[in-house]
Image (spheres, coloured by chain):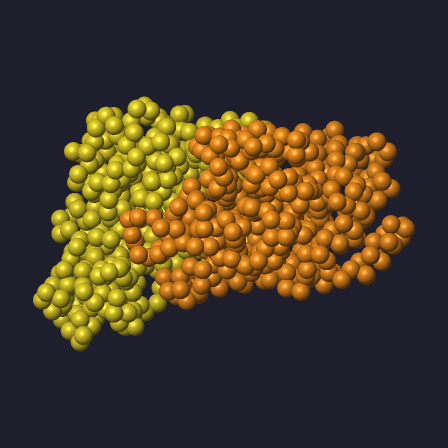
Chain colours: A yellow, B orange
């Protein structure tokens, strides 16, 4: 056994989260694509079967009340809340991330003085956020100004209505400084809107502590909600009474079954709801969140950093010099829960890795992405992934 | 056996769709709430289990290609298309009805001359459509003018950008004249946007034949897609190149995995997509659509009218004179697939009906709604429902 393989075993033996792995349905592959689609929690299939066969099939329409379907968006929001550092009553689940970015940005613009005509948007953002920001700006008479997160402090001014930033960059895995950038936005009188897709469930976010105004995130990455599981919207409690959604569907009405022609918004997080929630996907997510029982985000973060540290160590040992370049910062304060390696033939390399049971993903044109979900990835997985990568790159 | 019970049995014996009932999981109740939540098709539980355990649990991220997840919105749209009289390539599935109303109305307004500043909206609409129409109008600098469908022809003018109408009224079950109202809108230079929630799967719609411009609908009523299953958007082929969505998420990009900072819309129906589709709910819907194999909408419509005719006949025979008043038109050309009975104590009455195994629903303040899904409701069900209603009303 190599020294690194021995170290991996030791690290696994000391891993307080190791038992969590048994709460997922896994196989022999090393699955490092949980930053794209989380693995299947073992509790989900049975729960979904119950939702389909009993709740829908037998109780049918009664389940809107008796099975808690109607209140699922806010109930599940409250389950996500502690994972992102939010008190209850500020998150609703539903719709896609893109739709929630639209609600959040239009809502943010309407919360500030109309003279503020610019929205600063992370120029390196996952593209959908940028497309939706353009639409939100166009429909509210504002302008999008693309800036890198580093440029935000200098770009903020009394023209800034809101700033839309990614907590962790989807491509490089860089973690941005949410407390400092939120404070900078506030100092300029602007609102801070954060996209948590690549951080929620992987590291502490601290929405309440740092005074984030609005936030969105998906639930199918580190929250393991399943393919296309619904996203969520956070609106800080102090802003909820004035939050003015561009999608005021009947689910956000103060009296949804009053069937009134005039819209009167509900109070609290419910104001972020729109139409009828997609119950199957939503209750699969609820079951998936059971894996967080007894697991703290802080413990997950500590293991995440240990995993990515160890992966970088193994890559340095196994991969021929100069063959890959890490785009992911070495400093813990700047690292999310993934490692992105630049590699000119990344597409081919990822195909071969997958053939050999190491699943990451490829981001055009030259990036190998490896995501580390601490609840089910172990250190022996990490050593094996780096070793196979070294073999593939050595053979090419 | 009473005369009506005998007639019911005869009608069931002559019912060409009777065998379809076996394709649903039913029980002893008479389920007349399929206009709110369709019953569970027998094919769904097994399909969902496969999606969860194998597609998600085993193939994981590979399923986006290998299990056809990525193309599900347009593939399932093409399954719905023949049910609403649309050629392929004009419907995408995804998001809620409310979100699709927003896309459709903003899209419609952007397709007409900017001088047209009014949106006519059915004043008796399901409220969510009206709330969303107000938002769409506000965000595009237009005004909503509420009118009854009957008032539409006179209200149309060169100020009208678009008309938003319900094919079947959710409360009364009245069927509106889609061909005539669409033609009237076109004659005035406006676009016709139809909400098909209460007609799709219950009667022929004829979107292409009558030149409807945009349409939306849910899939959990007569299409039996399950609780909160995704809605759909129809954009007539000739308008697709100019359709300008207010929610231009990455799933509608011409090159979604190019991760380009600039938005360039896809061609065709895909332009109506937004973010990552909710796969569990969407593939449950796909399985649910299998019940349409061998069933034509025309046959469904013929049975639907026979069911509602027979229900009205039974109600007249069984219910004490003057105790209820039908809000649903007697003329077939004006009737959807439900019967709405006004009854002062409708809330109490519905509770008692449900206790006795006849499930309809109550709409505030005084309406009993009974929906008839011809694929699983039979004539003996209808006779029993009316008989129990008569007993309940006679005893109160």
Residue B320 is at least partly visible in this image: yes
The location of residue A49, given as percent across then percent down, is 52, 57
The location of residue B196, given as percent across then percent down, is 61, 45
Position of A250 with respect to B337 (left or right) is: left
Q: Residue at x 27, y 54 (%)?
A: A374
The location of residue A113, given as percent across then percent down, is 32, 23
Whether residue A183 is situated above or below residue A81 in the rendered picture: above
Location of residue B317 (image quadrant): top right
Residue closest to the eye, B360 or B163 = B163
- Quadrant for the N terminus of chain A, please: bottom left
- Quadrant for the C terminus of chain A, please: bottom left
Residue closest to the eye, A48 or B104 = B104
Position of B220 with respect to A359 (left or right) is: right
Location of residue A101 (image quadrant): top left
Q: Residue at x 21, y 52 (%)?
A: A172
Q: Residue at x 72, y 58 (%)?
A: B299
Position of A338 with respect to A226 (left or right) is: left
Whether residue B379 is situated above or below residue B145 in the rendered picture: below
Can you name the residue that lies furthest to the bottom here?
A395
Whether residue B71 is situated above or below residue B163 in the rendered picture: below
- Total count of labels: 0
The location of residue A304, given as percent across then percent down, is 23, 52
Q: Residue at x 21, y 70 (%)?
A: A388
Residue B227 is at least partly visible in this image: no
Residue closest to the eye, B324 or A350 = A350
């Amino acid at each position: 056994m190599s020294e690194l393989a021995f170290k991996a075993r030791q690290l696994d033996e000391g891993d307080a989260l190791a038992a969590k792995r048994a709460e997922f349905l896994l196989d022999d592959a090393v699955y490092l694509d949980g930053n794209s689609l989380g693995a299947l929690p073992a509790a989900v299939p049975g729960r979904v079967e119950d939702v389909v066969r009993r709740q829908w099939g037998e109780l049918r329409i009664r389940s809107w009340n008796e099975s808690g379907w109607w209140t699922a968006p806010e109930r599940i929001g409250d389950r996500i809340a502690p994972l992102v550092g939010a008190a209850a009553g500020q998150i609703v689940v539903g719709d896609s991330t893109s739709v929630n970015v639209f609600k959040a940005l239009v809502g943010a613009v309407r919360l500030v003085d109309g003279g503020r005509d610019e929205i600063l948007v992370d120029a390196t953002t996952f593209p959908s956020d940028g497309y939706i920001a353009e639409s939100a700006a166009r429909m509210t008479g504002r302008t999008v100004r693309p800036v890198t997160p580093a440029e935000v402090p200098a770009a903020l001014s009394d023209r800034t209505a809101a700033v839309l930033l990614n907590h962790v960059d989807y491509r490089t895995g860089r973690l941005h400084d949410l407390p400092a950038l939120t404070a900078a936005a506030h100092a300029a009188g602007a609102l801070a809107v954060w996209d948590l897709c690549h951080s929620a469930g992987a590291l502490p976010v601290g929405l309440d502590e740092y005074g984030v105004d609005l936030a969105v995130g998906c639930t199918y990455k580190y929250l393991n909600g399943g393919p296309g599981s619904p996203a969520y919207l956070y609106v800080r409690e102090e802003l909820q009474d004035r939050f003015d959604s561009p999608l005021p569907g009947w689910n956000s009405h103060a009296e949804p079954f009053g069937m009134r022609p005039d819209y009167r918004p509900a109070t609290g997080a419910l104001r972020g709801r729109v139409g009828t929630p997609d119950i199957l996907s939503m209750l699969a997510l609820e079951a998936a969140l059971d894996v967080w029982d007894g697991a703290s985000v802080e413990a997950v973060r500590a293991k995440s950093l240990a995993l990515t540290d160890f992966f970088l160590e193994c890559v340095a040992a196994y991969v021929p010099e100069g063959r890959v370049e890490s785009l992911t910062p070495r400093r813990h304060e700047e690292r999310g829960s993934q490692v992105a390696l630049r590699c000119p033939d990344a597409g081919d390399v990822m195909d071969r890795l997958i053939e050999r049971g190491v699943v990451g993903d490829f981001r055009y044109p030259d990036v190998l992405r490896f995501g580390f979900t601490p609840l089910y990835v172990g250190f022996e997985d990490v050593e094996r992934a780096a070793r196979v990568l070294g073999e593939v790159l050595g053979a090419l």
